[in-house]
Image (cartoon, rainbow, N blue to C red):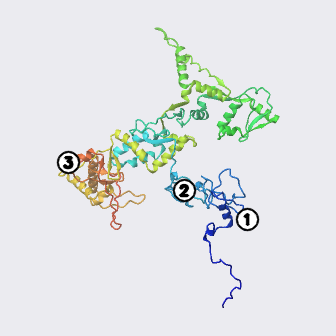
């Protein structure tokens, strides 16, 4: 419907607009216009404007910054309009400052599931916010010591004799694993890792020398009675006094006078309940130190804070009664010195040789040498320790620059020792993958005149007591040797136990029932087996055939003379041994039963090559 026009008369000049009046116009709120009207730089933002919620309590500030240390707090989160502090840490809505949360390497965003295993955590440690950090994966790696393992002399001699006798070819890793398999088979060589430098290679082991540390490493200390190594001299001496005190002193409980003095209080150990001594007793510090070293496993200064003072006269009297009994340590002379003194005394008192015509006195009447005089006695372990270190320090501890000890000692080293942790961690790693032990074995094997060579691109190293030999085209052998070589060439990596059936065509005999004697082998078959065994033994000892520890056989094809000399002079062959064939299940041959040495006549003489 139509609108009724207003009866008012419009003012004159209504349609005439002056645009200059809009120059200071702003579409912002009035409080922003007030700030801009003040002119100059924009003032600091305030939070004094009235809130829509009236007198409601201040709400928690969820802005993305962290208040700097020392900033005044307003409520729970500070002023809502406070600017972000310069250099402050940015907060994360998921909890805590972002700087406290683990990140992936390369600056990628946080992942609540934790970093990947190949991330920046040593040993594959993975963080998970659903629980505490997981234990590091893998053997312990000591930051203080490097460890190398070498074969113990006795076990290495047995191993070397077994390899020579068998004439078989062994993988170098197979030998290295057998060395570190049991503690009594190896010797551990431990060196300190100098900061910023690699440890030098052990001398005399055939290993390549590393960079020599610029700072001389601290020595090691070994307990002489049992050969256990320690990082410090005090630890070695304390071990000897605790475990081997009887080698140096005779001990006995004796009655002595009670300490004299005015003792109103006595200190007591709150951990063991033992009475120590009054603080004004002249041996108080020695008693506390001895009790701490024997019974307590915490720092001495921390332990002193746990000692209590008792002001009970009955407890003081109890301590005085306890001090009336003490252990007396009587010094034992060194066995060698005591024996020498006895011999000298016997020779000095021996009767003179009888004159001509006189009868010598019977041996029973000869004066027996007097017992060696007793050594000094001490009523405190501190005095006994001081005498021991002054008189016979070489019988207690010795110092070495490079630590070398047999593996059988490892179990006797204290469990808290860093040396033991380092050796056990390195040993666990070598039992998984004995690369360092294999490299350390090379020099020892070469000095024992073993042949070491590599096969193929994988670089697998093999060890054998026989030097390899290669045939040339036209080289002739006897008929039985040629047949055996041809079979091994055609069937590489065939088993020795398969030769009677696959080469000679002999039927395998069933195993005898329990309690029954094995079926006798016919003479004709026995003669063939003996000949086969002799031929194989000859080819293996001469180096024409390679026999592995599992009984696999390999014979390289003939090669020209130049190629033959090149390979025999080199330690690396370009091609590896072929993989053992996997026969089909339906055509899998039954392994021939092993013939015991008792059933086999003496080995036939070796068959020489025909050419």
Q: Up-down: is 212 above or below 109?
A: above
Q: CA distance from mark 2 to mark 1?
A: 42 Å
Q: CA distance from mark 1 to mark 3?
A: 104 Å
Q: CA distance from mark 2 to mark 3?
A: 63 Å
Q: Are marks 2 and 3 in contact (CB under 8 Å)?
A: no
Question: Where residue 225 sits in the image (x, y, percent)?
Answer: 54, 33
Write the residue at 69% across / 34% down. 288
Q: Residue furthest right?
A: 313
Q: Is residue 117 above or below residue 24?
A: above
The residue that disc 2 covers is 103
Find residue 163 and report its horizontal and vertical position in percent: 36, 45
Query: Residue 561: which numbered mark, if any?
Result: 3
The residue furthest bottom is 1
Q: Residue furthest top?
A: 356
Mark in front: 2 vs 1: 1
Look at mark 1 in the image and give the residue it sits on. Answer: 50
Could you say which quadrant of the image residue 6 lies in? bottom right
Q: Earlier in the sequence, mark 2 or mark 3?
A: 2
Mark 3 falls on what kind of element? helix
Between discs 1 and 3, the one toward the N terminus = 1
Q: Residues within 10 Å of mark 3 (few under 14, many from 20)?
A: few
Q: Is residue 435 left or right of residue 62?
A: left
* Extreme residue toward the front, this view: 12
- Which residue is depicted at the point 65% across and 41% down? 298
């Amino acid at each position: 419907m139509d609108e009724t026009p207003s009866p008012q008369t419009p003012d004159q000049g209504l349609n005439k607009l002056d645009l200059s009046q809009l120059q200071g116009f702003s579409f912002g709120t009035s409080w922003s216009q007030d700030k801009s009207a003040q002119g100059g730089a924009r003032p600091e933002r305030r939070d004094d404007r009235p809130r829509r919620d009236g007198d409601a309590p201040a709400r928690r500030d969820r802005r993305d910054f962290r208040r700097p240390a020392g900033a005044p707090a307003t409520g729970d989160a500070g002023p809502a309009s406070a600017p972000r502090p310069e250099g402050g840490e940015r907060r994360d809505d998921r909890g805590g400052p972002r700087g406290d949360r683990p990140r992936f390497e390369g600056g990628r965003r946080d992942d609540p599931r934790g970093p990947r295993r190949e991330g920046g955590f040593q040993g594959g440690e993975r963080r998970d916010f659903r629980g505490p950090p997981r234990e590091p994966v893998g053997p312990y790696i000591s930051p203080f010591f490097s460890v190398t393992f070498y074969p113990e002399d006795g076990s290495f001699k047995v191993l070397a004799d077994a390899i020579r006798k068998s004439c078989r070819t062994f993988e170098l890793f197979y030998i290295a694993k057998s060395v570190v398999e049991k503690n009594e088979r190896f010797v551990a060589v431990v060196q300190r890792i100098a900061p910023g430098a690699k440890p030098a290679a052990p001398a005399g082991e055939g290993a390549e020398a590393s960079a020599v540390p610029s700072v001389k490493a601290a020595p090691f200390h070994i307990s002489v009675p049992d050969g256990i190594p320690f990082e410090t001299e005090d630890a070695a001496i304390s071990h000897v006094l605790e475990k081997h005190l009887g080698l140096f002193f005779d001990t006995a409980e004796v009655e002595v006078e009670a300490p004299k003095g005015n003792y109103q209080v006595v200190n007591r150990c709150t951990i063991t309940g033992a009475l120590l001594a009054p603080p004004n007793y002249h041996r108080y510090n020695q008693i506390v130190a001895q009790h701490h070293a024997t019974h307590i496993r915490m720092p001495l200064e921390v332990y002193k804070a746990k000692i209590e003072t008792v002001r009970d006269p009955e407890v003081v009297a109890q301590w005085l009664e306890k001090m009336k009994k003490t252990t007396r340590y009587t010094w034992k002379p060194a066995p060698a010195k005591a024996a020498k003194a006895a011999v000298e005394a016997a020779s000095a008192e021996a009767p003179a040789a009888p004159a001509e015509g006189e009868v010598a006195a019977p041996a029973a009447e000869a004066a027996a040498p007097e017992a060696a005089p007793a050594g000094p006695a001490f009523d405190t372990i501190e005095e006994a320790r001081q005498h021991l270190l002054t008189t016979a320090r070489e019988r207690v501890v010795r110092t070495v620059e490079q630590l070398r000890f047999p593996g059988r000692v490892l179990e006797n080293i204290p469990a808290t020792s860093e040396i033991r942790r380092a050796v056990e961690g390195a040993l666990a790693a070598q039992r998984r993958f004995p690369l360092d032990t294999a490299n350390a074995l090379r020099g020892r094997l070469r000095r024992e005149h073993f042949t070491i060579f590599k096969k193929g691109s994988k670089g697998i190293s093999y060890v054998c007591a026989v030097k390899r030999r290669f045939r040339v085209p036209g080289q002739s052998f006897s008929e039985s040797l040629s047949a055996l070589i041809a079979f091994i060439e055609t069937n590489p990596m065939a088993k020795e136990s398969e030769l009677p059936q696959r080469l000679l065509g002999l039927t395998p005999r069933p195993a005898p029932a329990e309690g029954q004697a094995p079926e006798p082998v016919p003479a004709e078959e026995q003669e063939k087996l003996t000949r086969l065994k002799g031929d194989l033994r000859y080819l293996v000892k001469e180096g024409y055939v390679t026999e592995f520890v599992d009984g696999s056989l390999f014979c390289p094809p003939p090669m020209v003379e130049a190629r033959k000399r090149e390979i025999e002079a080199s330690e690396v062959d370009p091609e590896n041994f072929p993989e053992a064939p996997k026969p089909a299940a339906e055509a899998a041959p039954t392994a021939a039963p092993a013939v015991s040495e008792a059933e086999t006549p003496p080995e036939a003489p070796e068959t020489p090559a025909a050419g």
